């Protein structure tokens, strides 16, 4: 599975068409991890530079939590 991880969906992002919270990124990561197939996460998008790293970390931690 290839996932385009666009953190421009974050609530803090000035260009965000969505309002995804850090806990939402973690929950999405858990769901992706639960699929349990080989996965590539490609970080793309995100304009709130101060928050990108933390949001990617939230998703990755959720991904690990979701793995069986």
Image: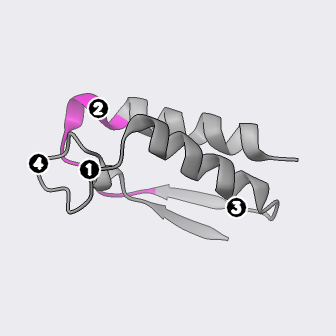
Decide: marks 3, 2 in contact (CB < 8 A)? no
Q: Disc 4 versus disc 1: distance between alpha carbons?
A: 9 Å
Query: Counting residues from the N terminus, which is met first, the one under dot 4 or under dot 3?
Result: 4
Callout 3 environment at 10 Å: few (<14), some (14 to 19), or many (20+)?
Answer: few
Decide: marks 4, 1 in contact (CB < 8 A)? no
Callout 2 environment at 10 Å: few (<14), some (14 to 19), or many (20+)?
Answer: some
- Front label number (3 vs 2): 2
Query: Label 3: which residue?
Result: 39
Query: Counting residues from the N terminus, which is met first, the one under dot 1 or under dot 3?
Result: 3
Query: Label 4: which residue?
Result: 14
Q: Is residue 51 magenta?
A: yes
Q: Which residues are magenta?
A: 43-52
- Position of the N terminus by quadrant: bottom right
Identify the mark at residue 65; answer none if there is no mark: none
Query: Counting residues from the N terminus, which is met first, the one under dot 4 or under dot 1?
Result: 4
Looking at the picture, tell me which residue is in the foreground, 55 or 11.
11
Query: Counting residues from the N terminus, which is met first, the one under dot 2 or under dot 4?
Result: 4
Q: Disc 3 versus disc 2: distance between alpha carbons?
A: 24 Å
Which quadrant of the structure image shows residue 34?
Answer: bottom right
Question: Helix, strand, or loop for circle 4?
Answer: loop
Query: Label 1: which residue?
Result: 46
Please tell me which residue is depicted at 26% across the width and 59% down the height of the picture: 18
Query: Label 2: which residue?
Result: 51
Question: Helix, strand, or loop for circle 1?
Answer: loop
Outermost residue on the right side: it is: 68
Question: Residue 46, image x and y in percent?
Answer: 26, 50
Question: Residue 28, image x and y in percent?
Answer: 56, 52
Q: Disc 2 versus disc 1: distance between alpha carbons?
A: 9 Å
Please tell me which residue is depicted at 38% across the width and 32% down the height of the picture: 53
Decide: marks 2, 1 in contact (CB < 8 A)? yes
């Amino acid at each position: 599975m290839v996932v385009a991880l666009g953190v421009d969906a974050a609530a803090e992002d000035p260009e965000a068409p969505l309002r995804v919270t850090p806990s939402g990124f973690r929950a999405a990561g858990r769901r992706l991890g639960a699929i349990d197939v080989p996965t590539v996460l490609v970080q793309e998008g995100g304009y709130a530079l101060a928050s990108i790293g933390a949001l990617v970390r939230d998703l990755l931690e959720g991904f690990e939590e979701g793995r069986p």
